[in-house]
Image: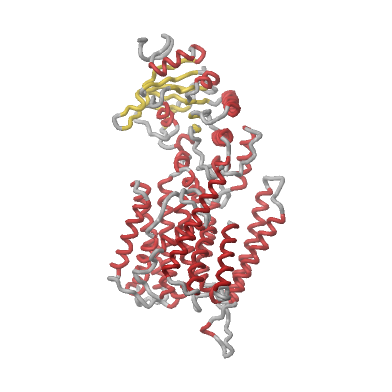
């Protein structure tokens, strides 16, 4: 984890130098945070999928399918119900995500078709289905409230709310560390060193406050005064959704039976079965989760575009897998972490963003990100060899 | 003799046309260690997997404490007090000792979330009772030695108060010192009144710890005999030739 953070820091410094100080401006970091959200949400879910020795190649197509359906429901079916249309349309999208997850999970778990095949089929099916929903048309414009979910001037928390949220996050972090210490103290005579916990809190609080300060210092360009100053944007709503996803999935991974069983299944499927775990239903739940997260990603993407189109989400599955792998998830199963996947997504998006600033074309950008992926996988192989020796 | 802990009566299991287990009966008493012997493919693992709930039987009756039970899943067997320690130990390599010990039966907080600290504490307690030198309970079990992994597997069975223990090749992956630890442990479990089925190829171990032997060949019962009544050569004869050594043994092929 520490090595990934160092890699990210190195990339940021290199890009900052290469772009002559453009990369680490509040404006670019705000954009980077919005750009990363969708990929990071997907890669968090992909961690569970890969840890359980599965794969999901249908993610990008599913984003298109649920995105178009959400837009279609909002604009065509629920036209004339302003206020509730956007909420109901999101429910439609999420329901489709659940349905597709059930469908794919059933084929994998109860019919024994490898996930690679099932989701490859899904990759074709849902993109085609996305086209058929509106006969290939782009559906726009979308509800104004809905658009805020995509970020931007209207889709950010503003300065005050951002600081309140930041303060709450700091308090929660401190409480979390203290509580872990107390729980552990019940059963052991030698608690971990105090300085380590203090260091955790100090670094965590510093990171949270720095993030909020940067987001708050990017002026809202729609409300500039005569001197060119405006109120800060604050944290973007897509980032807020990402934070929510990270909290929920981290909790699932570490504190629930579901998460424990996902890791146990990835470590040794037979042992999970012999321990009496319903491994088939476990796999179905994983695919349902990925379906729901795809639908969430579709909401952010369509809200940001202010349109539902069947071309969205292309290559999203491959970026999500790449981010998870760069973030330390092992394709052999059993190993992976949600925060790692977020850092992986941030590394990919930082490279992409920085290289765009440097005016590098999309083809060389793909090559560079591909090489980073190979390097990360190689690191994983070397690390595993060391550890097993 | 006390009432049997387990009775398996007329057990059948077939995979397609293959009769893996064909009308086999045996029983296990409290404080008794019974060795299940036979070649590869003789049906011993299949027989034992019916008792541990992995394979549903195709006929026959299993009684635990004299009551007929239906063992449709590993969970059912666990509920009946039957714990199984598998040859490949059935541990998830990437999870620590506590996580493996409680796998499938985690301790929960009142919120329904994993009580990680209590599980770590309980696991440490029972593991040290078995093997006082084993303190690395927080490491993924891949980092542990064969004996330590065996300790985790046995601790799992003990924590949940197994009355009936099934051990599949318990010493296969172990060095001499660790084998001795496991043998000592088996003897101490026996004194506690736990009944143990052991599947093993290691004739030396079988004669050291078992009270009785059940020998299978081609899915059929060759015979059941007390260890004190036979020699190693006679047992090998039962396994290889499928013949009972003497009239005192239960039904089997007549001497050639």
The reply to whether residue B160 is visible in this rendering is no
Residue A228 lies, in percent from the top left, at: 57, 87
Numbered circles on residues, count: 0
**Residue shown at 35% from the left, 65% from the top:** A65
Locate residue B140: give its quadrant.
top right
Q: How is the image coloured?
A: secondary structure
Q: Residue furthest bottom?
A: A226
The reply to whether residue B217 is visible in this rendering is yes
Residue B179 to residue A238: above or below: above
Residue B47 horizontal side relative to residue A187, left or right: left
Residue A24 lies, in percent from the top left, at: 57, 73
Q: Looking at the image, which is closer to me, B66 or A329?
A: A329
**Residue shown at 57% from the left, 76% from the top:** A20
Residue B19 to residue B103: above or below: above
Residue B74 lies, in percent from the top left, at: 45, 37
Quadrant showing the C terminus of chain B: top left
**Residue shown at 52% from the left, 83% from the top:** A221
Q: Looking at the image, which is closer to me, A6 or A92?
A: A6
Q: Looking at the image, which is closer to me, A228 or A283?
A: A228
Residue A288 lies, in percent from the top left, at: 41, 56
**Residue shown at 57% from the left, 25% from the top:** B183
Q: Looking at the image, which is closer to me, B197 or A368?
A: A368
Residue B175 horizontal side relative to residue A71, left or right: right
Residue A106 to residue A61: above or below: above
Locate residue B177: give its quadrant.
top right
Residue A153 horizontal side relative to residue A178, left or right: left
Residue A177 horizontal side relative to residue B76, left or right: right
């Amino acid at each position: 984890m520490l090595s990934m953070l160092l890699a990210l820091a190195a990339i940021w410094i290199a890009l900052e130098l290469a772009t002559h100080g453009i990369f680490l401006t509040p404006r670019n970091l705000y954009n980077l945070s919005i750009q990363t959200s969708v990929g990071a949400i997907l890669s968090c879910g992909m961690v569970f999928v890969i840890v359980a020795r599965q794969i999901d190649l249908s993610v990008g197509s599913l984003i298109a399918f649920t995105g178009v359906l959400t837009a279609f429901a909002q604009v065509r079916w629920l036209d004339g119900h302003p206020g509730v249309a956007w909420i109901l349309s999101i429910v439609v999208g999420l329901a489709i995500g659940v349905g597709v997850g059930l469908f794919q999970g059933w084929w994998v778990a109860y019919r024994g078709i490898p996930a690679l095949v099932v989701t490859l089929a899904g990759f074709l099916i849902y993109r085609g289905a996305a086209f058929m929903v509106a006969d290939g048309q782009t559906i726009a414009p979308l509800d104004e409230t809905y658009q805020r979910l995509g970020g931007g001037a209207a889709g950010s928390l503003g300065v005050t709310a951002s600081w309140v949220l930041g303060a709450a996050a700091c308090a929660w972090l401190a409480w979390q560390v203290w509580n872990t210490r107390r729980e552990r103290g019940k059963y052991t005579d030698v608690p971990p060193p105090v300085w380590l916990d203090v260091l955790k809190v100090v670094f965590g609080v510093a990171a949270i406050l720095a993030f909020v300060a940067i987001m708050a210092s990017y002026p809202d360009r729609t409300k500039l005064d005569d001197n060119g100053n405006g109120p800060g944007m604050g944290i973007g709503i897509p980032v807020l959704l990402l934070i929510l996803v990270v909290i929920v999935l981290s909790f699932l991974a570490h504190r629930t039976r579901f998460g424990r069983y996902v890791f146990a299944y990835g470590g040794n499927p037979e042992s999970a079965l012999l321990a009496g775990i319903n491994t088939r239903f476990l796999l179905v739940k994983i695919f349902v989760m990925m379906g729901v997260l795809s639908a969430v990603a579709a909401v952010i993407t369509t809200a940001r575009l202010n349109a539902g189109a069947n071309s969205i989400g292309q290559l999203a599955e491959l970026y999500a897998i790449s981010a998870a792998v760069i973030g330390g998830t092992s394709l052999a199963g059993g190993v992976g972490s949600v925060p790692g996947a977020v850092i992986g997504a941030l590394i990919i998006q930082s490279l992409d963003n920085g290289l765009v600033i440097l005016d590098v074309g999309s083809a060389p950008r793909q090559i560079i990100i591909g090489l980073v992926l190979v390097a990360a996988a190689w690191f994983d192989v070397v690390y595993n060899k060391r550890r097993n020796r | 003799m006390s009432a049997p802990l387990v009775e398996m009566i007329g057990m059948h299991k077939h995979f397609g046309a293959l009769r893996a287990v064909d009308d086999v009966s045996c029983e296990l008493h409290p404080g008794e260690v019974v060795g299940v012997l036979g070649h590869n493919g003789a049906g011993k693992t299949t027989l034992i997997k019916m008792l541990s709930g992995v394979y549903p039987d195709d006929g026959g009756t299993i009684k635990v404490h004299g009551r007929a039970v239906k063992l449709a899943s590993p969970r059912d067997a666990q509920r009946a007090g039957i714990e199984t320690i598998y040859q490949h130990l059935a541990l998830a390599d990437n999870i620590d000792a506590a996580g493996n010990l409680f796998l499938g039966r985690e301790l929960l907080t009142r919120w329904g979330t994993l009580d990680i600290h209590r599980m770590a504490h309980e696991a440490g307690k029972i593991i040290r009772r078995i093997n006082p030198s084993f303190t690395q309970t927080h490491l993924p079990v891949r980092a542990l030695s064969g004996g330590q992994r065996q300790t985790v597997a046995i601790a799992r069975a003990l924590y949940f108060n197994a009355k009936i223990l099934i051990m599949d090749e318990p010493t296969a992956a172990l060095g001499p010192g660790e084998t001795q630890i496991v043998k000592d442990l088996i003897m101490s479990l026996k004194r506690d009144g736990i009944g143990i089925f052991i599947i093993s190829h290691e004739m030396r171990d079988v004669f050291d710890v078992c009270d009785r032997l059940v020998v299978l060949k081609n899915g059929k019962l060759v015979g059941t005999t007390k260890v004190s009544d036979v020699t190693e050569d006679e047992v090998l004869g039962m396994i290889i030739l499928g013949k009972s050594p003497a009239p005192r043994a239960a039904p089997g092929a007549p001497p050639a």
